[in-house]
Every structure is written in C-alpha cells, then in structure tokens.
Amino acid sequence: MDAVATNGVATSAVAARAALVARHRSIDALIASGEWPLQVSTSLAEGLVLGLLKQGVRKYLAVFGHGSTAIAEVLRIYEGAGVVRTWNFRNEVEMAHAATALSWQYGEVPAVVTSIGPGALQAFAGSLAAASDGVGVYHVYGDETTHGEGYNMQQIPRIQQGAYGHLTSVMGRSYVLHTPEALREALRQGAVTVFDAVRAAPFYLLAPINTQPSPLQLNLAALPVRPRPTPTVMADGSAFAEAAALVRSHDRIVVKAGGGARRHALPVRELAEAIGAAVVLSPGSTGVLPDAHPQNMHVGGSKGSISGNHAMTSADLLIAIGSRAVCQSDCSGIGYPRVQAVINLNDDPHDLNHYNRTTPLRGDIAATIGRLLQALGPFEPSEGKKRWLAECLDKKSEWRAFKAARVGTAPLYDEAWGCPVLTQPAAIGTVAAFANEIGAVKLFDAGDVQANGFQIVEDDRPGQTWTESGASYMGFAASALLASALADRPAYAIAFSGDGSFMMSPQVLVDAVEHGLRGMLVVFDNRSMAAIGGLQRAQYGKEFRTSDAVAVDYVAMANAVRGVLGVWGGTSREALRDALARGRAHPGLSLVHVPVYSGDAPEGGMGAWGSWNVGSWCEAVQAEYHRQTL
C-alpha cells in the first residue's frame, strides 16, 4: 500500500508531480508543455509550494512543529526531486533575520515556515526588521483549526476568529488560508506585497493545521505569477518646471539620500554633480556616492557627522530622495531649520508629502531624476553654489580629521577588563578597513557598534555595508551571516556585533556549521549596553543597569562548536589584524572576540552631532519642532 502524503493523496503521486516540475525547470515551461492537466487533485500544502514556486520562491527556512507537518512533508518530497531547498534552524528570530538578509542582500525572496504559537510569534517578532527596511519575505505560520473543536495547543487563548491573522495584519498584509480554494487570492495579495518595487514587505500566510492537508482541485495556470516592476514617472510637467526653478533659485542645496536611493546611485550622483548639491547619507545608504567624493558629506541625523549635520542645518533647499524621514535621520523633525522649500522624489505617497512646502515628484527615482535634469536643461552651478560646496568640503575635511583621530586613538584603560583595550572606533575602523581590503561585505548589528559603524565605514558603492537601522534589531547581523550559506552566489561577509547583540543569536554558531557557512563574526565586547549607557550619561549624568560583571569567554564558546574557529582579538590594532587574518583563512565560520572600552572618555566613541526626541531632550526638541514650519 502506498504511503499517504496529505489527505489521502499518495506520496507517489506527489513525487511524480515533483519530478515533472523538476524536468521542466520552471512552472511556465511545465504549463506550456501540456503535460500538467488543467485540474490536479492535490492538497493545499502542495498547492502552496507550487504557487510560491510559480513566483520564483524556491528556498525555505524552517523550524517545523506540529503546526506545519503537512507542509514539511510536501517540502521533503519536492526537495528530493531537486525543485526546492529547505534549511532547518534552531531559532525562529534568527531564521527570520537570515531570510530578511537573503532577500535584502541577495535579492532572493524566500519563505519562512514555522509551527503555531511561540515559534510563529518569534518569527513574527523577527519580521519587524523586514517590515522596517522594506524587504519582501513570505512568512508561513501554522494556525488554529477551522472546525472549532476546542482550544488548539499554542493558539492565542482567546475566543476570537482568526486571532493570528489579526495580529499579523498589524505588521503588514496577512491572509488566513481558511479554505484551500482561497490560495489563489492569498498568493495574489502576497505577490504584490513581497515583490513591491517601491516598498516591499513581509507577507503573512496563516495556514490552519487542518486546512494544510485538505483536498484542493488545483489549476496551476490560474495561480498568480510574480508581478513585473513597472517604473513610472509623473505626467505633470509643471511639477518638474517648478522643481527646476527651485534648483536655480537656491544656492545652498542638500540632497538627503535615503534607503530608496541605494538602487539608484548613479542617477543620484549625476543630479548632485549637475546642480552643485551637498549629499547627506542615511545609515542605510552609505556608498551611494563614493566615500572620497567631494560632495559626499557622509551620514547626517541624530548621530550623524560634522559635515553631514552642517549640510542639513545650513541648507536652504532640501531634495529628499527615497527617504522616510526617520526620526534619527532628520533629527526628530528639526534637522533642516533653514530650509525654505523641499523637492521630494519618492514613489510612496505618504513619504512623498512628509514635509510642508514640498514639490512632490512621485515615481521611479531614476526616471524622475532624468525628467528633472531635462527640465533644468543646460545648467552651470552659480558662484553661490560653488561657495556652498567649498564650505561643506571644509566641514568634510574637519570630519575626516576628527574621524582619523578617533579611529587612531590609543588603547584606553577599562575597569571591566583591568587593562588598556581598543576603543569602539579603533576596533571597528580596523575591522572595516580589513573588510574593504579583502572585498568582504559588512553587516552591522544594533547598538553602539552600529552607531559608531555607520559613522566610520568608507564605502564606494551600495552593498558594501548592510546596517539594519530600520528596526535596529539586536542579533540581526550574526543571523544575517547565514544568508551567505543559502545564496546562489554567496559573498564573504563579516558581521560586526556587540556582545549583547551576539548573545541574542548565539545559535548561529551551530547553524553556520550545519549549513556550511564561510564568514566571520566579530564580537566587540564591552560588557555593557554602551549606546544606552552613553545616552543615560548625556541626559542624566549617570548610567543605570546597562552593564554587568559577567566575563564570557567567547573564544571558548566558539571553539566548543566543532567547525567554528574562535580567535582572541587582542588589545592592539596589530593583534586584531592578525586575528582577522587567521579568521579569514578558516574554511568555515570564525569568531573574533575583541575587548573594547566602555566609559566616560569622549575618545571612546564617535560622538553625536544632532538632536533626538528622547528622554530629557524631549522638551527642547519638541519646542523647536513646533517653532519650525517645514
């Protein structure tokens, strides 16, 4: 008697279909061949896998449980045929981060699969990073049964229909597969969400335990395909004429390049050079202009830089490109006190009209820049614009000298370590320079490492650095390393992680070996939450409960996992560079443990150069915000 895969469907029938899909290599080719009947009797679980495959989703990251066994069985059969690939993980948050990185860094949209209950909630929590950074990922969670036979183990213990569907819909689009025939509409909504060319997002498919194996008459040709991007540009020529007039009439122009500018680096550079604008970056857009470019003023905002924040506070015309105006990016709304007008290039109507006195240019950024340059016509920057760039360039020189001094700071005595150790800037600068030398991708975790990192990195193109500043999720960088074990064309990556962030996802040590990751994790250990401790000192003069006295031997921890190499990073730049070289030579995952300074000495960090509406600063920042009219 043949084994049963789902709801009476023979395993042999599922395997035969999987082999047929594998032979034709694509769903479109399979449909065109005529070998697949118009209607196939199968299960919702198999229909889901085929529907996602039709959209190009062939990679699954999973922590299976009793809420996802039917899907797991279909994936087992289809992986055996070489159609899909599934990787099992030890933690759902880690898995969600790895999926986000696979989509964000490599452009490969995967599906995350969990059980019902705690696993789904953990993956849902991890999806905050994807939602905040505009990254498309399918999330497939088990859900309570639809026949209402009583509480299901691990369901939300509340008498309410579709509780998980309600919960996930708060973060983004969500669909409960209450009946198998709903699959077509669910995948249509999912496709336009995860593949949105403007702001992609996670899509949550809730798969009730009992509907996963339920019978489905599947018409494969009727399932939605992956949508094609359709770049658009405004038809209203008067808006471009208005924007061109503003560019001509203002000398002190600042371009704020947000995360949306990252995919359009060349057009952004062309515009900035043509109009004589200073360009200020966000933490996620380093590399949009080469680091040494004379118009690149580096990051600006609540942390910012001397040059970036000077350009923001001194400009009289703002050109926002692909920016969400996040509080830390525009100093909680008071970052442009002298700006008289705004030209906003964005394809999102909400972000497009964030500021008053805005000339909105909605549409594809590259196409919109082309139309704006066309409206400007032959253009020679005025003497006023040239003086503005010279002024900004002076500030850039000041910032570069300051950064060199901080990165070059000698080791400082640290009480927790009982000896002089490297400062965060010195250690991060050493690792960042090493990464650039070997062509490694840099992944930054949340906290003090991230804040100092985006001030320090020197990128010449987008994609050299990925910093999860949208949600600032601790543990992201270590988990994101795993995407390089899953990608079709992996890049060598180095994760920059604080000790606290690493301890959010230490299971990466095991999963890295399991999945054959080659990369490096650098743990900058100051035994404290230095970003928050520094904020407490700046606001209230005292730290409170942001450090501990527990020493952890991360080298021993790493070496306890067979296949991982743990290396002590030492207390000098020379020792750290030697450790990095040893780590790079290792054929698997290496972990370099670096002790770093935490304390009152200003040389211990890169400093803050803007305003932020938090803590004791709220009253002053809010008062200034309401005085301004932008």
Image (cartoon, rainbow, N blue to C red):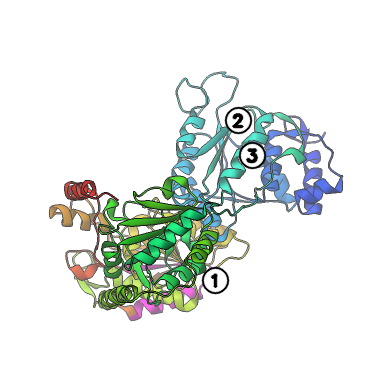
Marks 3 and 1: CB-CB under 8 Å? no
At mark 3, the secondary structure is: helix
In this orientation, which residue lies closer to the viewer: 19 or 278?
Answer: 278
At mark 1, the secondary structure is: loop
Three-letter code, disc 3: Arg
The image shows residue 523 at horizontal and vertical percentages of 37, 64
At mark 2, the secondary structure is: loop
In this orientation, which residue lies closer to the viewer: 537 or 293?
Answer: 293
Q: Which residue is mark 1?
A: 587
The image shows residue 289 at horizontal and vertical percentages of 44, 71
Asked if 216 appears above or below 292 in the picture, the reply is: above
Task: Report if residue 473 is visible in the image.
Answer: no
Marks 2 and 1: CB-CB under 8 Å? no
Q: Which residue is mark 3?
A: 188
Q: Is residue 190 magenta?
A: no
Three-letter code, disc 1: Pro
**Which residue appears at 49% of the width and 61% of the height?**
481
Packing grade of label 1 (10 A; few <14, some 14-19, many >=20) is some
- The magenta region covers 574-594
Q: Quadrant of residue 149?
A: top right
Q: Is residue 575 magenta?
A: yes
Give the Cα separation between the discs numbered 2 and 3.
Answer: 22 Å
Say which mark, if any, is on residue 209. Answer: 2
Asked if 380 appears above or below 198 in the picture, the reply is: below
Q: Earlier in the sequence, mark 2 or mark 1?
A: 2
**Which residue appears at 24% of the width and 75% of the height?**
411
